[in-house]
Every structure is written in structure tokens, then in C-alpha cells.
Image: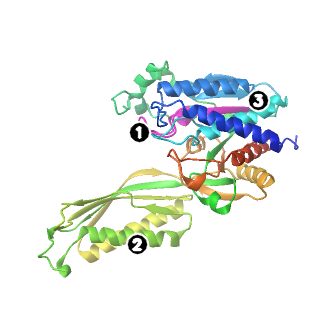
Amino acid sequence: MSGCLMNATEAELAAARVMARCDALAEISETGDKLTRVYLSPEHMRANTRVGEWMAAAGMQVWQDSVGNICGRYEGAVANAPALLLGSHLDTVRNAGRYDGMLGVLTAIETVQYLHQHQLRLPLAIEIIGFGDEEGTRFGITLLGSRGITGSWPESWVTHPDGNSITVAEAMADVGLDASKIGQAARQVSDIVAYLELHIEQGPCLEQEQLALGVVTAINGARRLNCRFVGEAGHAGTVPMSHRKDALAAAAEWMVYIEHSTPQHDAQLVATVGTLQCAPGAVNVIPGEVDLTLDVRGPQDQPLAALLSELLTQAEAIALRRGLIFSADEYYHIGATRCDDRLQEALSQAVTQVQGRALSLPSGAGHDAIAIAERWPVGMLFVRCDRGISHHPAESVMTNDVAKAIQAYLLAVVNIAKS
């Protein structure tokens, strides 16, 4: 079965189908002019129905699980064989693009469509899952779909409210699901061999390298902190410069240090000050307090921790020199998720066969693979997107790139299933 690579014509037809289906799913939105489709909404259920129809047409047995994921199974050469799981998510942010998440589900269906059309069965079954919630747009908690199949929902999630005070349990009931049966979505570890996810890059690296496809090494870990500099407010006209305890000046010095020092640690580390509030906030008053946020990310936990430690030490040193007080409170912490070496190698070989070489790169955004990696090996394939734009209506991919992605995805699936 080593010659199982789609030819160019087949790939072009498959890519055209994927692009048309992305457009069709983009029409399923809570607003007519902007794509918004959130977990446990009527639009979520309509999208599941459409995707389920496409799965069935590709020769799959289809079901919706107890947390609202849409699932399909294409049996292997032997009945009840363990499965290679493919997928991504079908929910969106508000005013979203049409490829984030959806592209991964629809290209997976094309890999099964090829096997079905050619009457091919692999040593493993192939399962595809369209996760109901990855973005966390509605309830502010993320990965509800993928944590459903890993059986790692915290008990508190069912009582978590959305912006209209509707709890997860109530929202489930509204679409015919039963919160008491959430545990039924969990899969046995022995049911699944590994998980592959295809996704738009959401960054500019592939475009800069003039490559359609890349192989993900890891999904970045992240730390988020609320930080504060406390100095002394004073009259902007009467306090001499040498006597000031300006909290904003201290924050500005630290921000410049963050920008310069982070890339010196590791080119794959990033740090961002995303918000800044000054008090008392008047044009003629020296800022006495500044609150700011720090977001640091990287593909390996130890270098990330080392960077954060240095940045916080420097903030304290700046505050001490200026006669201020600095404090920081970490409110979000997620470890880096390493992609499985053997899956990386299989994807790299497939990508090299399709486009001549394979670029390896980390993912700076989160994915369902984070949750899945707690139970099974994960691998990820990136597809180039225009200017790296995502979570925006301008999100765009090229049909030719999607054709290459389907070719590489299919080849990797076949080789992994054989090995």
C-alpha cells in the first residue's frame, strides 16, 4: 500500500470539496454577517448534522457522543481494531474565520473518503471527531469536547454559567443531552492508538519559508500573570524628576527589557504585555500604580520557567532601584505539550514526499491535542495561512495548499496504521 498517495487530480478534487464544505459550515452561524458558532448552540447541532452526513457519505458509522462531539468510524481490516483518531474542532470564536478547526475535520474526512472509494482497509480503524468546544467562547472554559473523550471534566464544569447565566448542564438539556451521562463520552485508552490533528498555522512561519505544510514539534506551554508596580502619585508640575516614584516609568522600563531579553533566551520563546492600567490616570498626575499583564509562552517548560524567573527578578530590581514595590500573581499555567517523536517522523516523511522538505515548528496557540496528549500520543500537521491571520474573517488558505495537505495527511495515516 506504499503507493497509496493521491494523485494530483484526486487531491485537487478533494481540496475543492473541502473548500466548498468550509464555506457551507461558515453559513451555519448565530449571526448572518459574522461567523459565530458556540458550544451547545442550535448552530453547533446543525454543524454536527452536516458533518455527520459527510462522514456517512465517506463510508463511516456516525454518532454524536454525550458531550456533543460528532464522531465517525471507518473500520479496519479486522473488526473492532483499535483506531487512529483524526480531528479538530467545529466551534468558533466570535466573528471568526472559516478554517480554524473546520479544516482539520474536513481534510480528515477526505482521507477516509479516499480509502472508501478505493475499497481499502487498514490494520487500524480510522475515527474522526469534530470536537464541540475548543475555543471556550461560550462558557470561558476550554477543551470541553476533547476533555470529554479523555474523561477529565472537572465536576464544577456542569454548573459553570455562560454570559446569560445558562449553565453547561442547562445548555446540554436544551439540545437534548444529559449532563449526568457526560462520563459516557470517555474512551478507553486501548480504543485509540494515536491522535493526528491538521490545523492552519495561525502564524507566518510557513509563509516566510514559502512552504504549504509544516510539522508541529510541540504546543507551547503558557504562563499568565497579573503584575503591579506601586509607587507614589504626585503633582506633575511640582515634583522634581529626581524625587519621583513613577510606577508607569518603571513599567515602561520593564516592558522594554522584556522585549529585548526574551529572544536572547530562545528564539522560540515569546512574551507579551497585553494590558496596562494607570492610576490615578490623570494627565497632570504622576502615575502611582500600574497594573499590567504578562503572557509568556514556549515549547519547553524549563526554558519557559527560566525566562519567567529572570523577567520577574528584573521587575523587582527595577522597582527597588526606583523606590517602588513590585508584585505578581500567576493566574494561568499550562505545560508545554510535546508531539510524539514517531508521529512527527511519519508526518515529516509524508510532507517531504509531497513538497520536497519538511519544516518543524512549534504551535503558539492551544489545540485539542493538549487534552488528548494526556491519554494518547499526538501529532500535528500545519497548513500555511495568509499572513498568519486567524480568529478573524480574513483567515484564508489556498486550495493548492489544502490539496498538498490532504496528500500528506493520507500518506501519514496509511504509514502510521501499517507501522
Query: Could you classify mark 1 by the number of other residues whose Cα lies within 10 Å: few (under 14), some (14-19), or many (20 or more)?
Result: few
Q: Nearer the viewer, mark 3 or mark 2?
A: 2
* Quadrant of the snapshot with the C terminus: top right
Residue at the image position 56 percent from the left and 63 percent from the top: 268
Q: Write down the quadrant of residue 12 in the picture.
A: top right
Amino acid type at circle 3 is: Ala
Total of numbered circles in the picture? 3
Instruction: Name above or below for residue 44 compared with residue 88.
Output: above
Q: CA distance from mark 3 to mark 2?
A: 55 Å
What residue is pinned by disc 2?
257
- Mark positioned earlier in the residue sequence (1 or 3): 3
Residue at the image position 56 percent from the left and 54 percent from the top: 388
Amino acid type at circle 2 is: Tyr
Residue contact between numbered discs 1 and 3, judged by CB atoms under 8 Å: no
What residue is pinned by disc 3?
81
Residue at the image position 83 percent from the left and 43 percent from the top: 7
**Colour setup of the view:** rainbow
**Whole-percent x and y of residue 411?**
79, 44
Q: Which residues are magenta?
A: 126-148
Secondary structure beneath dot 3 equals loop
- Is 98 magenta? The answer is no
Out of 379 and 214, give the one closest to the viewer.
Answer: 214
Amino acid type at circle 1 is: Gly
Q: Which mark is residue 140?
A: 1
Instruction: Name above or below for residue 115 compared with residue 387.
Output: above
Out of 365 and 390, give the one closest to the viewer.
Answer: 390
**Whole-percent x and y of residue 196?**
67, 42
Q: Which mark is residue 295?
A: none
Secondary structure beneath dot 1 equals loop
